[in-house]
Amino acid sequence: MPKTRSVAILIDTSTSWGIRLIKGINKYAHQTGDWLIHVEPRGRYEKLHLPAGWNGDGIIARINRKALADEIVASGLPAVNVSWYPFAGPRVGRCTVDERQTGRMAAEYFLANGFQQFAYCGPLDRPGYVDQLAEAFSQAISAASFTCHQFKPPGGDQQTLAWNVHLASLVRWLNELPKPTALLTWSAARGRQVIEACHYAGLRVPDDVAVLGGEYDDLMAEISNPSQSTVDQPAEQVGFAAAEMLAKMMSGRKPPAQPVLFPPSRIDVRHSTDILSIDDDLVRDALKLIREEAPLGLYVSDVVRRLAVARRTLEQRFVKTIGRTPAAEIRRVRLEQAKKLLIESDRSIADIAKTTGFGQQDLFSRTFRRCVGLPPSEFRRQHHSGLWLSKDNRRT
């Protein structure tokens, strides 16, 4: 009979990201059958510590400060870090969502909606943290020949500074931004604060400022007014993979030399970004038509006929305005709908191919692999929390 392993989980239980991470860890623990998990209810900004008097075998932690990293390293126990903070270096394994891919996905989403003015609002004071989300977002915006404005918070201890001081600085900054602006925030919690500041600044969301949260949190997204779009991330898969990594380390293997990074899943579009910032009426009308009907089998010839425009004219104005052809936009919309169905449903791939306008499964699979980088079945395995953890699809 294998030895029972005692594992401490130092992850907040107050966010969707934290809860889903723990669910993924728990699913791995249930599959192995020999783990005892020690976890306590914790808030996002609590300073977590190893439990006093706890004697265990391994640790999975959201290490967001150096003091916690030092404490974990001093324990000598195998440990895996699931945060964006690279504290502790190679002494601790690391498994998380790819921060840079998240920034690029956000930029591509805003650019696809025709925005030409961009901004980023990062986290509150984070000593020792290099914001790669901001770097990747800004670089993608610069590559498209645009500028990204970044919020600089007021001085002082960010964790103790009064909210009205933060709010006033956000209001001033938001009023100074060119309009309309596509604004990425570090997290959904930060996005909710920005949306609140827009209210006090008299700015309309999404008409004046379209707000997208970079770190998924369903509660923060839902209670924002209007509801907030976020970058959805495979948190349960990250938790499962982190547990798998820890199990190997507890069996004597060294931490991986490089972090294991998972791509974000998709943009979960809600009201805070539900707008097309397109000056060209023809392109805007065509985009609306494509986004409503592309999964129903719409083709470029249908768009040309419905809008009574020459195909060459439509293609030229599309490329000039959003940098791609109508056919490429139809394909992109179909693929986004397919991703949604692969993640959220158990429908067959053949059925999804028909439902999203591709028709034949072979065509869908070839197109999906060419554009996404992996076949639909593998994408589902990576991002569908029910299927990829099933017994027949267990990670190896």
Image: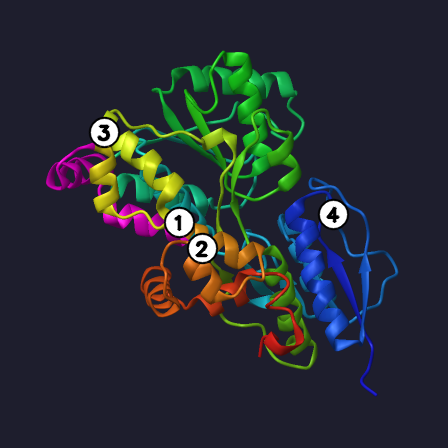
The three-letter amino acid code for the residue at tag 1 is: Pro
Q: Nearer the viewer, residue 214 or 136?
A: 214
Q: Which mark is residue 83?
A: none
Percent of width and height locating residue 184: 45, 35
Q: Nearer the viewer, residue 337 or 164?
A: 337
Q: Nearer the viewer, mark 3 or mark 4?
A: 3
Spatial CA distance of label 2 from label 4 is 37 Å
Q: Nearer the viewer, mark 3 or mark 1?
A: 1
Q: Tell me the residue that label 2 is attached to.
A: 355
Please determine whether, in this image, residue 309 is positioned above or below residue 242: above
Mark earlier in primary sequence (1, 2): 1
Spatial CA distance of label 3 from label 4 is 48 Å
Q: Tell me the residue that label 4 is attached to.
A: 13
Q: Residue at position x 27%, y 39% from top?
A: 142
Can residue 113 be seen at all in this image of the molecule? Answer: no
For disc 1, the neighbor class at 10 Å (few under 14, some 14 to 19, many from 20) is many
Q: Indicate left or right for 29 with 346 as reference.
A: right
The three-letter amino acid code for the residue at tag 3 is: Leu
Q: Indicate left or right for 62 with 52 as reference.
A: left
Q: Tell me the residue that label 1 is attached to.
A: 295
Please determine whether, in this image, residue 332 is positioned above or below residue 228: below
Spatial CA distance of label 3 from label 1 is 21 Å
